[in-house]
Image (tube, helix red, strand yellow):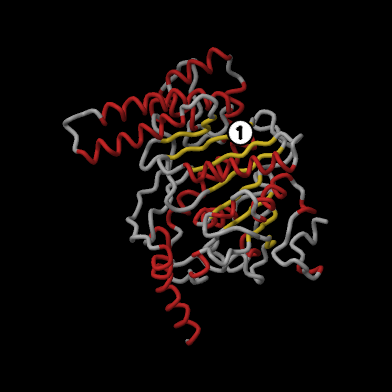
Amino acid sequence: MRRFKRALTACALVLAAAAGTVGWAWGEVQPAVTGPPPGAAAWTADHVFGRPLPDPATASPARVARFFAGLTADQRTRLIARHPLVAGNLDGAPAGLRYAANARALTAARDGELARAADPARDAGDRRRARARAAAYGALLTPGRRILAFDPRGRGQVAEVYGDLGTARRVAVVVPGSDTDLVSYGATARMARNLRDEMARQSPRTNRAVIAWVGYTTPVGVGYDAATGRLAEKGAPRLERFLDGLAATTRTSVPPAVFCHSYGSVLCGIAAHRLTGRQVSDLVVAASPGMRTDNAGQLRLGTRLWATARDTTDWVRRVPAVELFGLGHGTDPADSGFGARVVSSDRAEGHTGYFEPGTGSLRNFADIALGHYRAVSCAHPTPQPSEDCRHDLL
C-alpha cells in the first residue's frame, strides 16, 4: 500500500515537475494526424493507367515499390503532376519521385499561404500564421533540399534526407520529441545534420544518409499529451510504415539506426514491440522520459537497444520514472536495471544538447550508426566486463 501511494504521488508530480523545471505553460490537447495523405480519395479513384493505383491506406510499402518499379518515367511524371501530396508521402515510392512530388506540393502550399497572408478579410493572427507557414515552406524549397515527406495537415509534418539514399551504405533516422512541427522543424534538422557530419568525420569514405523524421503529431508544451502515450500510440504505426518503406526502396545491406529524442523515445518504445531486425539495426534513446515499459525485455525488440546517460542539467531527470493510470512513461531507459546498453553523454548540456558537436553522445551516435561498436564509449569509464555496454558486440 505504501508503495502504491508513492507511485500515485509520483504520477501526480509528473506534470508539475516538468512544468516547474522548464517553465512551460500547460499544453493543449492536440488532434493527431493519422491515416493516408491528403488527396488519397482522388488517387484511388484515378484509373489513369487503366488499372487501380495502390491504395495508400492498405497497400504495403513493398506493394507500392513493386507498382512504381513497373512504371515508365513518363508515367511517374504524370502521377507527380496529378497527385503530388499522395506521391510525395507514399512509403515505398522511389525517393527521387517523392522529392519531386513534394517540391510541387510545397510550391502550391506556399503560394496558398502567401495568398492568405495578403487577404485583408482575415484577422491579424491568421495572416501572421500564414506568413510563418509560407516562410517554412519556402525554406524547404531551397535548391538541394531532399524532402521525403510533406503533410500540411494540422501543425504540419515533414521528413528530410541529408545525404543520398540511393548510394548510402549506412542510414540513420532521427525521431524528435515535443513541440516539433513543420514551422519549428529547425532544431530537428540540426540534429540530423550534426549526426551526418559526425558520421562523415569518423568515416569519410562511407556513403551515409540521415533522415529527420517529423512524421507524427507531437505534444505542445507540458500537459496531458506530454504525460501520456496517446500521441505516441497514434504515431507509432506511421514510423513502422516509414521504416518498411525504407526497407523496400533502399539497397543498404544494414537496416537504419533509429535515434529517438525525448518524447520521441515514448513513440519508439511503443513501436518497438513490432519492430524487427529487418527494419532497424539499432534503436537509440536520448533524454528519454521513459518508453512506457519497466524493462527492455518487455519490448521484445528484435534489435539492439541503446540509451544515453542523462546529463545532470537535463530537466527530464526530475520527471518521476513511473507510469500509473496512463500518466508518466515508466522506467528511465538509462537506469542500470532497465537492460539497455548505456552510453556516455560526456560534455552534453541540457535536454537538447545530446546531438551537439564535441559531445560524447554525438560521437557514440555516429559510431552506432556506422556499426563501429568497438569505438562506443560506455557510460562508466572503467566498467566490469559484465557491465560493458558493448560486451556481446566485441
Q: At x 47% / y 20%, what residue is drawn? A: 80
Residue 286 position, x and y percent, is 58, 57
Classify residue 374 by image quadrant.
Answer: bottom right
Q: At x 66% / y 46%, what residue is drawn? A: 257
Secondary structure found at label 1: helix
Judged from this view, the residue extending furthest toward the top is 74
Compared across the picture, whether 84 is left or right of 288 comes to left
Residue 259 position, x and y percent, is 60, 50
Q: At x 57% / y 52%, what residue is drawn? A: 260
Q: How many numbered circles does the render carry?
A: 1
Task: Find disc 1 in the rendering and name its residue.
Answer: 62
Residue 206 versus residue 148: which sits nearer the camera?
Answer: 206
Judged from this view, the residue extending furthest toward the left is 121
Classify residue 35 by image quadrant.
Answer: top left
Residue 265 position, x and y percent, is 55, 56
- Position of residue 22 relative to residue 215, above or below, is below
Say what amino acid the circle numbered 1 marks.
Answer: Ala
Compared across the picture, whether 393 is left or right of 129 comes to right
Pointer 1: residues within 10 angstroms few (<14), some, or many (20+)? some
Quarter of the figure that contains the C terminus: bottom right
Residue 74 versus residue 14: which sits nearer the camera?
Answer: 14
Residue 123 versus residue 168: which sits nearer the camera?
Answer: 123
- Position of residue 131 relative to residue 10, above or below, is above
Compared across the picture, whether 106 is left or right of 159 comes to left
